[in-house]
Structure formats: C-alpha cells, structure tokens
Amino acid sequence: MDRIAMLLVFLTEVSSVLSIPSHNVSQSSVHRPLYGPHMAVDNDRDTCAVTERGVNEYWRIQFNQPLTVKGMLLRLKGGNYSVEVRNSSNENDDRQICDLIHLPFPSVAYLVNISCKPAVPMDVVMINRTSYGSLTLCHFQLKVCDIPCELCTLEDTCRHCHDYRYGPSCENNCSAGCVPESCDEVTGECSTCLVGFSGKQCQLKCKQKFTLILEHISHIFLLICFREYFTSEVL
C-alpha cells in the first residue's frame, strides 16, 4: 500500500528484533568500493550501501534458512521503493510485496518501519528502487516471528499454533488429557477429554477406580449397541 513517510519518524522498541542470522548480501551495482552491500548490516547507521544511479537498482539479502519475516526497520534515502520477501527456490513466483514507499527528499535519510502481512516463511528480502536514482541503504534490521509460532501478527501474537500448543505466542502446552486437535489455541480449553481426564483443559486426572468404571460403562454401552444391531438384522 502506497504511503508517504514523514520527515521525522518516532519508533518505539519492538520485541522479537533478531540479530541477523547467517546471510549473503548483494546489490545491483556499487557506487564506490566503500559503499558495498555489507555496509547496510554493519550495525553503523552512518555507513551506507550505495548503488549507481539508474532504474531498478536493488539491495538483496539471502539467509541460509527460511525465516518467518514479520517486518524490518530500514534507514533509506529518499526515492520510491518496493520491499518484498521471496523464496530463493522460486523467486519469480513465490514472492510477497510487504510495502511500497515514497520518501520525498533524496538527500534525507529516513527511518522506515516495514510490515509484512501476513508473515510468511521466506529466505530472501529485496529492496528495489522503482524510480530513477541511486539506492542508499544505511541500516537493515530484521523482525521475525518467534518459534514455535508458524504465523504471527505484528502484535507478537500467533495466527496459528501447532504441536499441541496454545496462548498469545504459543508458549503453553495443551493438556495431555485433551483429545488431539480439540485444544483451543487461545485459551487451552478442550472440547473433548480422553477417558480418565476432566476439567476445562482436561487437566484433572481421574482416580484409577473411577477410570475403570468409565471404561466398564463404555464397554457395556458398546455391547448393547452391537446386540441391538445384530438382533434387528436377524428380525
């Protein structure tokens, strides 16, 4: 979605900001030897990766593993840009544009907070200059979803939990008494308990005698059902 970044951007501390994992960086061209692609990830906001002036200049980072990219913090000089995430195994088709941005003054370095919705597992981030000029990137900071979140929101909450987990960030384990796939991903409450368990989260274990009674009753009902079925068949 097209938007105009304000001259002064006030950013609050964001959780889940990751020190950049193993990666390779590249760019479409290099203005001078000291302005190579690694200058955007050297933790110094005063040094910049700078391309030649042109059309479709880009800066690219590829990670050695898929990451569920939630967003990124960039320090970019003015121009029009697209920011996208890609899958290196099929970059032409498996790609998602996170944002289209317009920064009005070419000589000003802006702090830009990029959001990727939905957050999806990818291993490449591309920043493309869509207007004529040089791409100047002085800082790149990645924000990813915390494991075991498969999909998360920008508010650090999961869109989906797996492996019998629940909670805002999938930080809790569902009760062992829950029937598989009956655990609510938000509250941990179970719609169905295994035999021998009770409670909203099936967290209460029945005493052994009571469990045997339940099993005995279930066997009686099953036997009655079979008898009625076969009797009706004979008649």
Image (cartoon, rainbow, N blue to C red):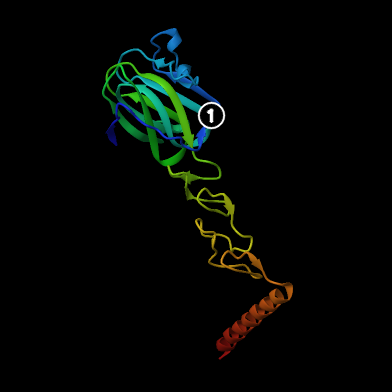
Residue 123 showing in the rendered view: no
Observer able to see residue 107: yes
Q: Residue at position x 53%, y 29% from top? A: 19
In percent of width and height, residue 92 lies at: 39, 31
Which residue corresponds to the image point at 73% horizontal and 72% vertical from the top-left? Answer: 208
Q: From the image, tell me which residue sits under label 1.
A: 19
Q: Is residue 117 above or below residue 186?
A: above
Q: How many marks?
A: 1
- Quarter of the image for residue 229 reads bottom right
Quadrant the N terminus occupies: top left
Q: Is residue 108 above or below residue 21?
A: above
**Location of residue 3 in the rendering, given as x and y in whole percent from the top left corner:** 28, 33
Report the residue at 54% width, 51% height from top. Answer: 162
Q: Is residue 77 left or right of residue 72?
A: left
Asked where in the image residue 202 lies, by quadrant, the reply is bottom right
- Extreme right residue here? 209
Which quarter of the image is occupied by the C terminus? bottom right
- Residue type at the position of mark 1: Ser
Q: Nearer the viewer, residue 209 or 105?
A: 105
Q: Residue furthest bottom?
A: 235
Determine whether the residue tagged by mark 1 lies in a helix, strand or loop.
loop
In this rendering, would 77 be left or right of 33? left
